[in-house]
Image (cartoon, rainbow, N blue to C red):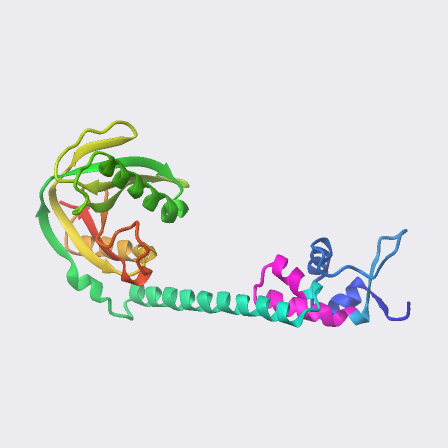
Amino acid sequence: MPDLVPIGRFSHITQLSIKALRLYAEEGLLYPTHIDPESGYRYYSLSQAEQAARIRLLRDLEMPLNEIREVVSTRNTETIQVLLRRHQERIAQRVARYEHILGQLQTLSGSKADPTFSSIKVNVVAPQPILSMRLLTDPSTFEEVIPATVSKLYSYMARRDLDQSHLIPLVIHHDYNEDLADVEVGVITERLISASDPMSSRILEGGLTVSMMHAGPYEDLGVIYPMLANWLLSHGYEVNGPPRELFLTSYTNDCIPGEHQTEIIWPIR
C-alpha cells in the first residue's frame, strides 16, 4: 500500500514514541495497518496520523487510557462531548487541588501567613474517659476506616441506650511502621462503660499539652504537624506522647471539607 510507513517514520510524524505506539496497539487504541509476517515490522497508514494526534493530545491531558479508547472508537459526537466534559471537570478539580498544595507550600516556606497558629495554646488537660478501638491500617484508608469505626462506636452506645449528644470523636496516632499506622479511634464519654474486645473503655491520660484549632480539610494536617513540631522546638518543649485529634464537626457526617473543625492536642514536657 503506497501510504504505509514503518513505525519509526510514523513515530516521527506523530511525535509519539515507538514504545507508546506499541502500548496503544496493545490497549486497542491504535493498531498498525500491517505487520510483516516474516520480520514482524509494523507499518501504519498516513491516514492514521489524525487519530494518533487525537490520542497524543488526550494523553497530554492525562485522560485515562480506557476513556481515550471510548473517544477514539465512537463516531457519536454527543458521546465524545460527554467524555471530554467529564475529563474537563476532573482537570478543574486537579487544578484546584494543585493551587491548594501551592498554598500549603507557601505557608511552609513562610511566605504566607497562617492565622491558624494564633490559636496555639499550652495548657493542662484533665484525664478523660473514652470508648475506643485500636487499629492497624494503611494511612491511605483513613478516609474510609475512621468514619466507619466512629459509626461502630456510636452504634455501640446507642444499643446500650447511652447518651450520645455530647460525644466527640477523636483519633490518637500511636505509631507508624512502613505502610501501617497504629491508630486508636474513639469517642470521649462521660464515664467508663462496659466494653469488650475489640472495643475498650479507658482513661485517656491528662497532663501538659499544646493544642491548636484547625479549620479546613483533614489532609492539611500533613502540613500543620511539621509546623507545629517546629513551634514546639523553638519554644523549648519536647513531645511527651502520641498526638490526638478531636473532630469538633462530626467525622461521620457529610461536612464540607473546608468546614471541618479539628483540634490537635499533643502531650508535651
- The image position of residue 238, as x and y in percent, is 18, 46
Q: Which residues are magenta?
A: 48-71
- The image position of residue 36, as x and y in percent, is 88, 55
Query: Does the magenta portion include 165?
Result: no
**Image mark count:** 0
Q: Quadrant of residue 182?
A: top left
- The image position of residue 106, as x and y in percent, is 32, 68
- The image position of residue 134, as x and y in percent, is 29, 35
Nearest the viewer among 171 and 78 is 78
Residue at the location (38% across, 64% down)?
101
Q: Say which quadrant the C terminus sits in.
A: top left
Indicate whether 151 appears above or below 72: above
Residue at the location (17% across, 47% down)?
165
Nearest the viewer among 209 and 194 is 194
Indicate whether 99 appears above or below 26: below
Q: Quadrant of residue 95?
A: bottom left
